[in-house]
Image (spheres, rainbow, N blue to C red):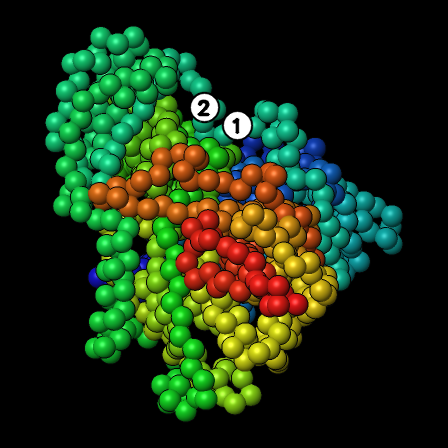
């Protein structure tokens, strides 16, 4: 069976949802009655499942997404409040519970049919189909930089505008005046002709009884009052004063702690456990054999960890003990060779005839790039507190998919999903790792046979060695140039395709292209890593386009710009990055400047990096980042996300490598899986273009361009082309004096 991309997964789910209810009218409708008792207090009026208005005129947005530092609670509340014409000072938020009524139908709809303008009469049926599908799949996802551009656009803005419409209608009914004579603003409704005014709260009970319009009129950017500004984020005060609750902060009466050790080799299992030696240790309560892992429960975490260290366990290697880093890359290379020779590579994107164009080219360049496995290395290690009691299972953790986690936990311990209550907390870093439920399932299984709550905490070593990793990959290129140096052919053959589907595609005007791939599975578990395949392919494609420019004897910025002619948004972003970086200015002899541009998750980002070579080591001194997300809902937060993505991607480019030895991960902690340190961080300047069109994401698009911009700058300084990351593996030297001159 081939790999699933997110789009394929969602599309199949939608199809399945349609099959299940074939011949039945599927409508999402107003679901507020389904969740009222979960999210609304007495006297509060609900509008759909996303909004409630309290008698004191407080407006609360119900947000179905988790906070992992990306500011999503604030941004989504802003989108709702702006369309509602609410007083921002009275706006609050609540994170939605893990419940099927909060399944991400808007995510599925926009992901499958981006920007589709359905007629009003069809919207409820379309949303119903996607709603049913996402319920079946357990999707309440925070990821893919999709929150603002899906839930924000389809749920928050639409609900805000629809609620404003019924509030006006309710006021018109009470005052016996035409709706056209009324205005809304600052959570009040006013009638200029009579001077009457009333709060949203006053009209809310009557308005809540009216049907919400499926396709209300939405504001244009020129009408925004809240969107496009940067109010303080909801989460900042409690994160500053320490009152914010992360998963690891959970504390319950009588709670015990668990430490876990999984089979070192992926696919291995427990063969024997000799627990006699640890039962007498202080605080030890129980040893649990999970089949592929062993856990120790104790009164305190350190007691559990020390007992686990002493526990004698024999694991099998699942037949994977011979796997090593070199053998994995040899496997990849052999697969590429075999597919190329046999013509069995799978088509990704084809335009024209790349083979014929290569044959006719004046010059042909070839290059091979390699990237290693990468861990997520979140600041907060994996953890989950589970309590099985009174015929239910309660969970306290930070997750990117509460509904999906609840489904999988229920399945693992033989409960119905309705019996699992998940209390989602702040996430101390996600990056895709907390969309994978392995640690939560472990915690529930450990707690299932105990009378007390159990907090499972993975050690940093366990976290590093049992991640779901960004894939390792090889990507091979052949590019053809004509007599003027213009690229006339682009051939790219890479290993393993995941998601998003468009990640390997290029924005450049090259008529003849062939982008193909081959599958080469390994025993190393794959997982979504910040920007997913974009982090690989931006490095591959932006490195190779740089090589073509150099081979053509052209300036690397000007070369890109010519190939982007006719794509005004790309041109504008590239030009802004070049302008703000003072591109073309002479640099000191020990410095270089590199550029890269990439579109991911609907957002175009160009970055220019200034690198200084000191004692043979590269140091990024300055990063210029130009970004076009369509429209910046919260500009300060967008800037913060660009800075975060740059730091994350630069860390990976410099140091990131998970290597396999004897079938297991060799790295164990931050001493051998290094992070970028504060004294190594570059100055970052971010410039925003509101380019219009569909909204793009913010959390991930800052990451893909940084690695190629960085390595292109290294080439500019040294003449050494980095085709394999991390950079720390390479010996660098400056160009000869005559080359610099």
Give the left or right position of residue 264, taking residue 380 as reference.
left
Near-viewer residue (430 or 448): 430
Image height check: is 660 above or below 394?
below
Q: Which comes before the other along the chain, label 1 or label 2?
A: 1
Write the residue at 75% across / 53% down.
225
Residue occupying the far left of the picture: 271
Give the left or right position of residue 332, taking residue 685 as reference.
left
Near-viewer residue (74 or 457): 457
Write the residue at 16% across / 14% down.
276
Cβ–Cβ below 8 Å for labels 1 and 2?
A: yes
Write the residue at 38% across / 67% down.
368
Q: Secondary structure at mark 2?
A: loop
Residue 250 marker: 2
**Does residue 376 appear in the picture of this structure?**
yes
- Percent position (x, y) of residue 639? 65, 50
Residue 668 marker: none
* Picture quadrant of residue 351: bottom left
- Percent position (x, y) of residue 538? 48, 63
Give the position of the C terminus as an image quadrant: bottom right
Give the position of the N terminus as an image quadrant: bottom left
**Does residue 713 appear in the picture of this structure?**
no
- Percent position (x, y) of residue 500? 42, 62
The residue that mark 1 highlights is 245
Give the left or right position of residue 734, taking residue 170 as reference.
left
Write the residue at 12% across / 31% down.
271
* Picture quadrant of residue 238: top right
Near-viewer residue (365 or 595): 365
Q: Secondary structure at mark 1?
A: loop
Dot 2 surroundings within 10 Å: few (below 14), some, or many (20 or more)?
some
Image height check: is 70 above or below 547?
above
- Percent position (x, y) of residue 164? 67, 52
Q: CA distance from mark 1 to mark 2?
A: 7 Å
């Amino acid at each position: 069976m081939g790999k699933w991309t997110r789009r394929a997964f969602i599309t199949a789910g939608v199809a399945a949802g349609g099959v299940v209810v074939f011949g039945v009218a599927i409508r999402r409708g107003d679901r507020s009655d389904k969740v009222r008792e979960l999210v609304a207090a007495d006297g509060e009026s609900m509008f759909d499942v996303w909004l409630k208005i309290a008698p004191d005129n407080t407006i609360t947005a119900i947000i179905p997404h988790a906070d992992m530092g990306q500011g999503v609670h604030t941004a989504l509340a802003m989108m709702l409040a702006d369309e509602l014409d609410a007083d921002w000072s009275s706006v609050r938020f609540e994170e939605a519970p893990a419940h099927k009524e909060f399944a991400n139908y808007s995510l599925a709809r926009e992901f499958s049919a981006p920007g589709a303008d359905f007629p009003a009469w069809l919207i409820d049926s379309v949303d119903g189909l996607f709603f049913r599908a996402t319920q079946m799949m357990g999707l309440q996802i925070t990821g893919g930089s999709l929150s603002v551009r899906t839930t924000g656009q389809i749920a928050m803005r639409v609900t805000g505008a629809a609620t404003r419409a019924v509030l006006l209608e309710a006021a018109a009914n009470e005052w016996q005046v035409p709706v056209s004579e009324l205005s809304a603003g600052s959570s009040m409704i006013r009638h200029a002709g009579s001077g009457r005014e009333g709060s949203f709260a006053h009209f809310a009970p009557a308005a809540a009884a009216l049907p919400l319009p499926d396709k209300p009129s939405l504001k244009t950017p020129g009408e925004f009052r809240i969107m496009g500004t940067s109010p303080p984020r909801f989460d900042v005060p409690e994160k500053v004063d320490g009152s914010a609750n992360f998963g690891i902060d959970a504390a319950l009466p009588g709670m015990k702690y668990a430490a876990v050790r999984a089979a070192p080799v992926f696919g291995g299992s427990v063969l024997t456990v000799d627990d006699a030696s640890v039962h007498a240790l202080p605080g030890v309560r129980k040893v649990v054999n999970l089949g592929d892992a062993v856990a120790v429960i104790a009164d305190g975490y350190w007691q559990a960890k020390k007992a686990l260290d002493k526990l004698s366990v024999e694991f099998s290697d699942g037949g994977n003990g011979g796997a090593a880093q070199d053998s994995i890359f040899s496997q990849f290379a052999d697969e590429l060779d075999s597919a190329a020779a046999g013509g069995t590579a799978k088509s990704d994107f084809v335009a024209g005839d790349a083979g014929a164009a290569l044959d006719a080219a004046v010059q042909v360049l070839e290059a091979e790039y390699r990237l290693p496995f990468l861990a997520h290395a979140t600041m907060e290690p994996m953890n989950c507190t589970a309590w099985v009691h009174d015929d239910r299972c309660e969970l306290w953790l930070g997750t990117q998919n509460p509904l999906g986690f609840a489904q999988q936990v229920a399945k693992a311990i033989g409960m119905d999903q309705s019996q699992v209550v998940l209390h989602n907390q702040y996430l101390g870093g996600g990056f895709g790792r907390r969309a994978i439920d392995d640690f939560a399932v472990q915690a529930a299984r450990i707690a299932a046979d105990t009378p007390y709550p159990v907090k499972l905490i993975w050690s940093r070593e366990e976290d590093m060695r049992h991640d779901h990793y960004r894939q390792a990959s090889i990507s091979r290129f052949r590019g053809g140039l004509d007599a003027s140096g213009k690229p006339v052919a682009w051939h790219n053959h890479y290993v393993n395709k995941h998601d998003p589907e468009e990640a390997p595609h290029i924005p450049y005007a090259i008529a003849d292209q062939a982008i193909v791939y081959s599958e080469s599975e390994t025993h190393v578990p794959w997982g979504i890593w910040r920007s997913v395949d974009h982090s690989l392919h931006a490095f591959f494609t932006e490195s190779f386009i740089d090589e073509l420019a150099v081979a053509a004897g052209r300036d690397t910025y000007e070369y890109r710009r010519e190939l982007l002619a006719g794509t005004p948004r790309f041109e504008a972003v590239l030009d802004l990055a070049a302008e703000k970086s003072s591109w073309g200015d002479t640099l000191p002899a020990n410095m270089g400047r590199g550029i890269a541009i990439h579109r991911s998750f609907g957002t175009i980002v160009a970055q220019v990096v200034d690198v200084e070579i000191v004692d043979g080591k590269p140091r990024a001194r300055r990063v210029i980042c130009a970004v076009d997300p369509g429209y910046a809902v919260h500009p300060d937060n967008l800037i913060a996300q660009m800075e975060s993505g740059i730091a994350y991607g630069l860390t990976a480019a410099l140091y990131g490598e998970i290597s396999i030895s004897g079938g297991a991960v060799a790295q164990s902690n931050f001493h051998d899986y290094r992070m970028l340190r504060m004294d190594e961080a570059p100055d970052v300047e971010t410039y925003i273009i509101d380019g219009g069109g569909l909204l793009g994401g913010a959390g991930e698009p800052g990451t893909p361009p940084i690695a190629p911009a960085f390595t292109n700058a290294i080439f500019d300084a040294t003449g050494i082309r980095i085709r394999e990351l991390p950079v720390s593996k390479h010996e660098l030297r400056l160009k000869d004096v005559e080359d610099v001159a």
